[in-house]
Amino acid sequence: MVCGMETMSDLKVGFLGAGKLGAFLASELVKSGLRKQNLFLSIKGGEETKKRISNYGLQACLVSNKSLIDDSDLIFIGLRPQQSSFLAECNFKPETTLVSLMAGIRLEKIRTLSKCKEILRMMCSAPETFRVGLGASLMIGESTKAESLAVSISSVIYKASDESTLDIFSSIVNAPLLLGMSRNYESSGKKIIEFLSRYLDKTTISSDEFYDWTTQVAERLLEAGLMSEYVAYGKTKEGVLEKVLNSYYENEDIQAALKTGIEKAQILALN
């Protein structure tokens, strides 16, 4: 696969904050042709995080933050949104491409903190959706290298120009989980359709197409027995999915849960 003037195998990619999602995406890039010697991971987590990376066969890719920043052409930012201020301490090279995976944190803030010129934001569905062959990503910004990487691992790629669409996407991308958890599949499906029609009406995402994706993913997750793994993925403290799940557990109202997730992303944007 061509990434501008470089092949993917030659591109040097870093994951600053290789947590659950970052480590998974890194492993998928390796499967798609990225050389392990050109992959750099840095973590702040403990033994559980190290074990996860080891299970992916990526322990040799662990490096210091400084080495990752110095050696990478493109860096995925997998920090928690609450840790975004750390970017100001990183001393990035201005020519490095940054792809933020952080919910809520706006491009302007990332640009101010990092001093980098080429910055994108990317929201992804949970690893379990990629495992069933239906991973989805939404991107804002332009970069041939970043888009090529995203295409290599995602079955569905959405593009947007308005960052508020990312707030919506970071919540509704979990609709398949809620649909799969619901006691009344048909009734829940109708509520999801209503919600998507309301919130996606003025975005670049078709509500009908997104609902088709939602039902396909829900069915495959149930068939593969991956619902519990998806729920476990949502235990990231103060994350959007955690808020969605907590709201759903309280009253089993899918629309209220998805709205809570959007509001959480909007709150993160203000910090």
Image: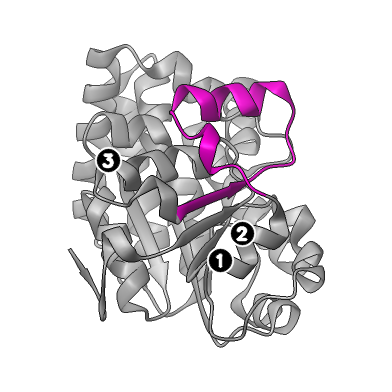
Q: Residue at x 40, y 46 (%)?
A: 36
Where residue 244 sits in the image (x, y, percent)? Answer: 58, 36
- Mark 3 residue element: helix
In the image, which is nearer the foreground, mark 1 or mark 3?
1
Quadrant in the rendering for residue 178:
top left
Q: CA distance from mark 2 to mark 3?
A: 20 Å
| Mark pair 1, 2: CA separation | 5 Å
Left or right of 174? Residue 184 is left
The crowding category of the residue bearing disc 2, from other C-alpha atoms within 10 Å (few below 14, some 14 to 19, many at least 20), is many
Identify the residue under disc 2.
68
Residue 166 appears in the rendering: yes
The residue wearing badge 1 is 71
Label 3 Cα crowd, 10 Å radius (few <14 / some 14-19 / many 20+): few
Q: Specify the amino acid type for callout 3.
A: Lys
Query: Which quarter shows the C terminus?
Result: bottom right
Q: Which residue is mark 3?
A: 31
Q: In this orientation, does residue 186 appear?
A: no
Q: Quadrant of the N terminus?
A: bottom left
- Between 60 and 4, which is closer to the camera in this rendering? 60
**Residue type at mark 1?**
Asp
